[in-house]
Amino acid sequence: MSFFWSRNCLKYRYSSDHLEDASDPLSSAPVELLPPITAGLFDAPKTFLEKRSWLRGILAMFRILEWHIVTFYLLAVVAFSRELVWGVVYTVEVASGVFWIFNFLHLSLGLLEAWSVYPGIHLSGTAVCGSVFTLLARFLILVYQTLYLIWTFGPEDGVYLGINAESDFWWWQYIWLSILCMIPWFFDACLQFCPPLQTKIYTSRSNFVQSFLNILVPLSRLYVGKEVTESCSHAAVYTLFWMTMIAWKLFFSYIFEVYAMVLPTLQLADDYMNFPDQSFAKMSLLLVMRWTPQFIVYLIDMSIWYAVWQAFAGTSVGFSDNLGDIRDMNDIRENFGRAPEHFCRKMLSPDAGSRRGSSASFLGNSQSNIANPNQEGTSLLGSDPHKLQSYVNRLLDVRIQKWVMFSAAWNEIIDHFRQEDIISYRERDYLKFSRFEGFSQAIYLPVFQTAGVIDDVISELERPKEEYTPRGKVATDELMFKPIANHITMRTAVSEVWELGSFVLLRMLGTVHNNDIVAIMNLILKWSESGTLVDHIKMENMSSVMSPFVALVQVLEGSIGRRKPAVKSRVAKGKSDIQTKSAGSGIRRAVSAASLSSLENDTSDLTMQKGKKADSEKAVIIDALRDQARDKFRSFAHALKGLLINPNEDSETRDVLDRITFLLSMENGFLWDDAYASDQLDECARNLAFKEVLTKVHGLVACHPDDAEPKSKEVRRRLTFFVNSLFMDMPDAPSIHDMFSWNVMTPYYSEDVTYTKADLEKRTDALGVSTILYLQTLFRADWDNFLVRNGIKDEEAIYSKKFIDETRVWASLRAQTLTRTVSGMMYFEKALRLLANLERLDEDTTNDLMGEKFGYIVSCQVYGNMKKNQDSKADDIDQLMHRFPHMRVAYIDTIRLNRAGASLYYSVLVKSDGRGNIQEVYRVRLPGNPVIGEGKPENQNHAMIFTRGEFMQTIDMNQEGYFEEALKMRNALQEFAKRDGPLPTTILGLREHIFTGSVSSLANYMALQETSFVTLGQRVLARPLRIRLHYGHPDVFDKLFFITRGGISKSSKGINLSEDIFAGYNCVIRGGTVGFKEYVQVGKGRDVGMSQIYKFEAKLSQGAGEQSLSRDIYRVCHRLDFFRLLSLYYGGIGHYFSNVLTVLTIYVVVYLMAVLALFDIEKIGDRVITPMGTIQMLLGGLGLLQTIPLFATLGVERGWWSSLREIIHVFITGGPLHFMFHIQTKAYYMAQTILVGGAKYRATGRGFVTQHTPMDEQFRFFASSHLYLGVEISAALILMGIYTDAGQYAGRTWSLWLASLSFLASPFWFNPLTFEWNVVYSDYERWLSWMHGSTGGSLKSWSMWWTEENAYYKKMPITSKSLNIIKALLYLLVAEGIRRSDLFQSDTTLNKPLISVGKVIVFIALLLVLVRVYALTERSMAYPIRRTVGIVLFVGLIAGIITVFIEDTNCIRYALAAYYGVGACCLVGLCFGLKVVKHFYFVHDVVCGHIIFIPLFILAALQIPHYVQTWLLYHNALSSDVVVSDILRYARRTQEAGGHVEANEDLIEQVAELKKLVQKQELLLARVGLAPAQEGASSSTDAIADLVSSTEDEMIIQPSSVVSPSIARNKSTAAVPRAQSMSGLDVWGEMALGDGGPGESTVDSYQSNAPQTQSRPTAQGFSFTQPDTMPPR
C-alpha cells in the first residue's frame, strides 16, 4: 500500500522547513516532535523499483515479445514441414513444442518479476506465496514437458520411467500437462477479444474471484487499472485493424524471412551429418549466426506494416471527417454559399440574434423576420426567381440574417489578418464583405468571391440559342437565364453590378441626366418583370456593352482616388435641388431608390480632407480624366443602343433609344459641358461612398479571380482550413452563458519575450546579418504591409520612439517568442466577445462572462527574480499584462529569512491593474521549494491552483493561436459532454500546424515529420485504435478529473523527462479516455537547425528510455488487451525500440558478413551463399515505407499529386539521409539512457539558424553518436569486400552503405557552405587547433571534451559494461580473422628484406620515445629548433612505417589486426577507467577526422558539389541563406555606409556574377520541375529579386520624400476605405461607413498610374550602386 494511503503519513509534518516559528495547523502536537515528511518517504517501503536495465522494458512489453517468439517458431515449423514434406501428425507434434516455449517464457517472466521487486519492495504474504507457488509449479511442469518431448522424439523402443510405450503415448502426456498450465493463458486469450468482460472480472466484488486474481494477476491488487477497456464496438474495429495487419505480416515474414533460411539450414545440417570434419558446435554457431538477423528483422518489420496500415486508416478517417474537402481558394468559392448556414448552425447558439428584436436595422426596408429562421424574407427577393428582378433584388438563396452574422465574423477574421500584416489593405478589401449605407442589400459578397463571375455570365448569355431553346419553341427569359438563376454567385453578381453600377453612373453623370437614366432603368425593369427582355434586348451581344463599361470603371477607379477637386464649382449657376429631381424621377424603390437614397445625404459629411501636395512628376491633368471618362461612356452608350431590338416597331424600345441619343447630345450635359463634367468628377472624388462602390464594381467586372486572391500562402492555408472546418463534424455551440469554462496555461522560464532593439540589430558571426534584416528578407511582403499600416515612409524611423514598440512586436510575432504565444492565446477573449456580440449580449454581461469563462495564466517561475534583477524580460511581461488585462502571471517568490539560507516560498499571481501598475492578486505559502523535480512540470503544477475553469488547455512557449480557430473553442469544449464509449473523455487533443517549415530545408523535414505525427498519427491512434495518449500541447484537460487523480504533470527528476506522456498514462490507467479532433488547429514551432533537431530528438529518445523503466508503462501494458497493447507499442514507445533494433540489425549484419568472409565460411560446402537480400530490402524499406504516412497526410489535405511532388522533392534534397541519421540519434540516446541514465531537459533554442557550423563543433556533437559508428561500419564493409568470394557484393551491402553514408555525410550535407574551399580550409585549421588544445573547456580542447563525453562509463553497472565487453570480444574475433588470413601474405624466407624489419621497428619505437620527450620539452626550445626537430621526427616515423610495410607486407595485415585488437583493449580499459586508453582514442579521432576531411577537400576542389548542394536545396530557406546570405552581408555593409557609397568596381563585378548564378540555378530548377514559374516565385526568391535589382539606375533613398516600397507598388491600384471592425460594435445596430485604417488618412495611399521615374527604394536608408554582386569571401 502506498505511503500516503497509510496512517503512518499522519506521523510526519507536511513541511520540510526547519523554522522556529513554524507550526502545523493540522496537528495538536508540537511541530518539533514530528519529523518532516521527507524522512517518512525515505523509510517507507517502495511499491515499484525503476531498475535501469533493458529487462525492465521487456517486462512491460513481454506479451509482444512472447507473440513474436511463438509465431516465429510456428512459421519455422510450417516452413520445414513444407520443405521436408512432413505428415500432418508429425507437423502437429513438432508444432506442439510451442507449449514448452510458452511455459519457459512465463517461467522466465516470473523470475524477471522476482528480480524487479528485490530488494526494497514490500509485498504482502499473499503475493509472496502466490509468486512462489506459480514459479515452482511452472518449473516442475517445464521439467516434465522437457522429458515428455525428448521421449516423444526419442527411439521408438525406449523404456522411460519403467514404461514401455510408443512415442504417441508420451506426446499425449505432454499435451495434457501442457493444457493444465495453459488454462490461465487460454482464458486470458479469450478475454482479449472481449475487453469489457475483462473489466467486469477485475471490478468483481466476489471474494472468490479476487482471491484467484491476487495469485494469478498480481497487478489486480492495485487501486488503479481496473477500468481501461473500450466498448465491444470499438474493440471490434481495432481488432480488425490488427488482425489484417498480422495476417499480412505473417505471410510476408514466412516467404521472405523464414522460408528463405530453411534450405541453408538443411545444407548446414547435411554437411554436419555427412562430413566427419564438421563439429556440432560449429554447425550450431553458424545456425545461430544466420538465424539471428532474420529474427531481429522479424521483431521490427511490423513497424513498417504499421506505417502502411496507419496511412490507409488515417486516410479513410480523414476523408470521413471531410478533411481536405477544401484545399484552395477555388474550393472556397465553390462552397462559400454553404458556409453561413453551417457557421450559424454550429458556431452560434440557437437563440443567436433573437434576444433583442430582428435584423431590421440591417435590412433597411426588407421585411425579413429573423425570429423565424425557417421563413425567408420574400419581399426582398421578388415573386419570380427566373426574372431579372430576382437578379437585382435577391442576394443569395439562403437566409439573409445568417449571411449578416457570418459576414460579421468573416470580416473580423480578415481584419485580424491585416493587423498581423499578412495581407495588404487591397487584399483585405478584396476579401471582406462590403456594406453600403442606404443600399438595398445588407451585405455584398467579397470581391474574391465574385471576381470573374460576370465574365461567366456573359459566356452563358452568348451561347447559341439551340443550346437552351427546344426545337420549335421561341426563346424566353426563363430558358435563357436558367443557368444564371440556378447559380447563386452568378445571380448575386448580376444583382450587385446592376445596383452598384447604376449608382456609379448616376453619380458620375449628375442631375442633368438623372431623369433619362431613371426612365431607361424603369423600362428595363418592366421588361424583366414581364419576361420580355429577350424580345427587346440582344442578350447574346452583352459583351459589346460590358467591354466599354469595364473600361470606364477602370479609368475611374485608377484616377479618381488621386484627383484633387477644385475649391469652387466651375459652373456659374448653383446646383439644382437633388431631392426634387430624385423624387420626381419615377424610378421604383424596389430596385434603385435605396441606392439613390444615398444622394439625399449631405455630401459635406462625406467630403474628404485635403491631401498633401502631390509630386510634380505625378500631377494628374483633370481634363485628361474627364476626356477619358467621356470617351469610355460614349462607347458604352453606343454599344447599349446597338443592343436594342427593332426600336422602330416598339414604342418602349424607341423611347430607350431616344433617351440614349438625347443623353449623348445634350449641350449642358456630361459629354459636352466641360465645366459640368469636371464638377461631377470632383463631386465623385470628394465622396467616400462613391469610391467604395466604385472599387466594389471594379472588382466585380474588371478583376481576375487570381488578382483577388491573397498572395500569402499562410492566409490561403488558414482560410481554407477555417472554411473546411465549417463542414466537419463538430458539436453545436451552446450559448455563452451555458458554455464550459476553461483556462489556458503556458509554462515559461527565460526564453525571449519580445525582441529588444539590441536583439533586432544583433548579427551572427558568420553572415553579419541582423535579425531584423533577416526577417525583412524572409517576410518581405509582411514587412511592406507593416510599413503601410503604420504610415512609415522612411525605414530609418522604425526605431523611433513612435514606432519602436510596433517594430519589436512585428519581429517577435515572426519568431518563437512569448509575445507570439500570448497574442495568439488572447484571441480566445476577442473571439468570445465577437460571439457574445453576435448573440446580442450587452457590454456589462459580456465583461462579466469573460472573467468567468476564460482565463490565461503564464506560469513564469523566475518572474520574481527577473524583477529583482531588473531584467528587461520582466518589463516585457508587464507590458503584455497591460496589453491584455485578462492575462495573469504566476511565479514563485522566494523570501530569505536569515544568513543560514532558510527561505520561505510562495506561489504568487499578479495582473495589470489597468492603470499601468502590476497588482498582486494571490499569494500562497508553499511548504518548501516546489522545484525539486523536472522544471517544466513543476512550473505548471505550482500555478494549477490559480486556474478557475472546468477545463485547462496547456500551451507551450513555441505555439501560437489564430483568431478564426478561437471562434471554435466552445464547440471543442462540448466534446467533453459527449461520451463515446463506457469511459468519459478526459483529454481532448487538437491539431497542430508546424509554422517553421519555411525557415530551412531541415526545418521543412522536421515540419513534415511532425505534421504526419500530430495529424495522421494522432488521428489513427484516436480512431480506430483508441489509444491516443497526451503527446504534448495543445491538449485540453478535464481539470476536475486530473486534480483529483494526481495532476496533469508528473515531475520526478529524470524519469518524468517527457512529462506530457505520463499525463496520458495517468488518464488511461485511472479510467479516462483521450479524444482527438481536427476541426481546430494551433500553430507550433519546431527546431530549425541540425544541432537543434539533434538535441530535440535526443531529448525525446531519452524520455522514451525513461518511460520504459517507469511504473506507468508497466501497469498500462499489463492491463490493456493485446490489440490495444500493439497500438500503444507501435504508435508510441515501440517506435524508439524499433530504432534501436534497426541499428542493432545493421551492426549485427555487417559484422556477421565480415566474420563469415574473414573465416571463409560464407559458403556452405561448395554451394553458393544465399544473399541476405531480404534484410537489405527491409532495412531500405524502413526508410522508404516510413514516408507512406507522410504521403497520406499530405494527400488528404493537399491532393495526391501535390503530395507526390513534395515527397519527390524531399528525396531529391537528401531527406532519406536526414531520416536515417536520426534513426541512429534515437537509438543511441535511448540505449544510453537505459544503460546509464543521464536523461535531462535539453534547451534546443528558438532562434534562426543561418550560419555555417564549424567542423570542430560538428565533431563534438555527432562523433560519439554517429561518426564513430559510420566509420566502423564502413571499415567492416571494406573488410568484407576484401575477403568475400561469394559475389553479389553490391546487392548484399547497398542498404548498409546507405546507412553508413547517412551517419557520416548528413551533418555536412545539411550545413551551409560545406563544400566551399575557403570554408573547408578554415574548418580544418580550427579542428586541428581543437584537437591539440589542452585548456579552455570542451569547446577548445579535444582532451577535455573526451573526458566529459566518456565520463558516464564510470557510472555504468556491470551488466551494462558486459555489453561493451561482448563488443570487445567481437573486435578480437575480427582481429584474429585478419591475422590468420592470407591478405598481403609474403614469404620473407624467399624474398629477404634489404633492411631488417626488427631493426626498423626498434627505430620506430625509439622515435616514439623521442616524440614523447619532445612533447614534454618543446616549450623550452627555440622556435627554429622546435620546428626542425618536429619535422625530423615526423618524417622519420612516416619513413619507418612505410619501410616496414614495403619490406614485409605481412605487417600491413598485422597492423589491421592490431588496430582491432587495440580497439578491444581500449574499450575494456575505458569501461574500467584506465587513463592510458585516451592516447589511443586520440589517434583514432585523428584518423576519423581525416577520413571526413579528405573527401571534403576533394569535393571542395571540384567546386561542382558546392553548386549542386545549392541547386538541390534552393527552394528551402537554408539554400536561400547560401545565396541570400552574401547579398545580405553586402546589404548590411551598404546600410552601415548610410546609403551613399561610391561605386566599387570589384563589388559590382562580383554581384553581377552572383546574379548570374541565381538566374542559372533558377533556370536549372525550372527545367527539372522543382521551380515554379516566375509569377509563383517563393518569398525567398522575391527577396533576392528585391535586393538584387536589375535596374541600371542608381538607387538612393531620400528619407524626407521617399515613399515606402509597398506604397510604391500599391500606387498602381486603388482600394476601398476599410469598414470598421465588427468586434466591439453592435452588429445589429445602424451600419456606418468606417473611416480609413492607419496609413489611409490621405488619398496618397491609393493614388496611381503616373509613370514612375524613380527607382524602387530599398530598405532602411541604404543605397545600391549597380546592386548585382557580392564582396569576395
Image (spheres, rainbow, N blue to C red):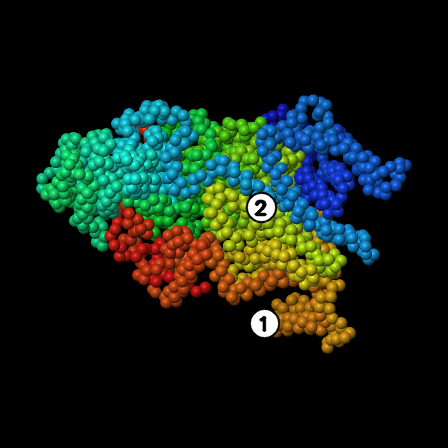
Q: Do we see residue 445 in this rendering?
A: no
Please give the residue where the numbered disc 2 appears in the rendered image: 1099
Name the image quarter holding residue 334.
top left
Asked whether 1301 or 973 is in front, the reply is 1301
Left or right side of 502 for 431: right
Q: Residue visible at 50% across and 38% down?
A: 318
Which sits in the foreground, 962 or 545? Answer: 545
The extreme right residue here reads 162
Residue annotated with mark 1: 1423
Q: Which mark identifies residue 863?
A: none
Residue 78 coordinates in the image, percent (x, y): 72, 43
Tell me how far mark 1 sits from mark 2, CA to CA. 48 Å
For the C terminus, the image quarter is: bottom left
Give above or below for 354 relative to 1250: above
Q: Hey, what amino acid is under mark 1?
A: Tyr
- Secondary structure, mark 2, is helix
Asked if marks 1 and 2 touch (Cβ < 8 Å), the reply is no
